[in-house]
Image (cartoon, rainbow, N blue to C red):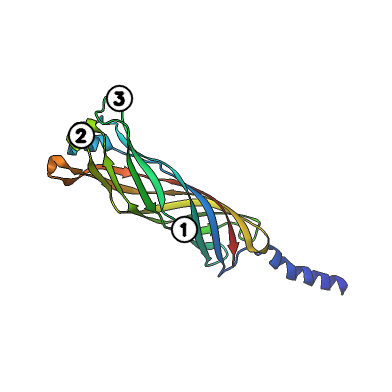
Amino acid sequence: MKKTAISLMLAALLPAMHAQAEQGDWVVRLRATNISPNESSDLGKYVNKNVANVMSNGAELKVDSNTIPELDISYYWTKNIATELILALGSKHDVSVSKEPGSVVPNQKLGSIDALPPTLTVQWHFNPDQTFDPYVGAGINATFMLDRSLTLNQSSVGALQGSKIKIDHSSFGPALQAGFDVNLKDGWLLNADVKYLWLDTDVKLRNPLAGNAWTKIDSLDVNPWVLSLGIGRRF
């Protein structure tokens, strides 16, 4: 009788000890997120073709990395399947021209862009009942350019000096992610996460050689890696 009572008590305690994620759970995480562009640019080719022959074909646009605070919210449809919405603050990135030898346009900073990159993914959690819970996910990213005005300032570009440059206002593309939660006591957890976003946008120059018409000077693939570390709470 005593052994039976102990067995029943242990059976009642085990779900409480190991059930880390359940259907209907909400998880809120606060993370430090580094956005590191893996850009691909054909600036020189487009400028030489559409504006004037002032660059080497290897000239490119470069976008620097930035680290920002990020809030995300997850909802568990089942113990294994969750939806995550990432609500990052605007991320500011310097944009520069990088040239090959022989280009008339020197290396120069054109300005900065401020991008807002909300991302929605669906995740599969492999070990929701365990302390270590790895997951993979896929979804969609929508990047909105809040501040997207740049300027070509160098005097060596002649008539193009002072010309305004703009980046298209938005980009939509797929997103992949992988990461893990370390489930702690009382609903707290640690999190590490990596995402790859497909983000492409057109870059245009207000061209004084064409009546100040907006002329395409690049098809810029930013395609950033997004690396995050943080803490969360399950509700």
**Secondary-structure class at tag 1:** strand
Would you call the spot at circle 2 few (<14 residues within 10 Å), some (14-19), or many (20 or more)? some
Task: Look at the image and tell me whether residue 223 can be seen.
Answer: no
Residue with the mark numbered 2: 48
To which quarter of the image does residue 163 belong?
top left
Would you call the spot at circle 3 few (<14 residues within 10 Å), some (14-19), or many (20 or more)? few
Res. 86 mark = 1
Q: CA distance from mark 3 to mark 2?
A: 15 Å
**Secondary-structure class at tag 3:** loop
Q: What residue occupies the far top of the structure in this picture?
A: 102
**In the visual, does 139 lie left or right of 184?**
left
Q: CA distance from mark 2 to mark 1?
A: 39 Å
Contact between labelled residues 1 and 2, with CB atoms less than 8 Å apart: no
Indicate which disc, 3 or 2, sits on the residue closer to the N terminus: 2
**In the visual, does 185 lie left or right of 113?**
right
Q: Amino acid at mark 3?
A: Pro
Q: Amino acid at mark 1?
A: Ile
To which quarter of the image does residue 187 belong?
bottom right
User: Where is residue 31 shown, x and y percent of the image?
Assistant: 53, 53
Task: Look at the image and tell me whether residue 18 can be seen.
Answer: yes
Residue with the mark numbered 3: 101
Q: Amino acid at mark 2?
A: Asn
**Secondary-structure class at tag 2:** helix
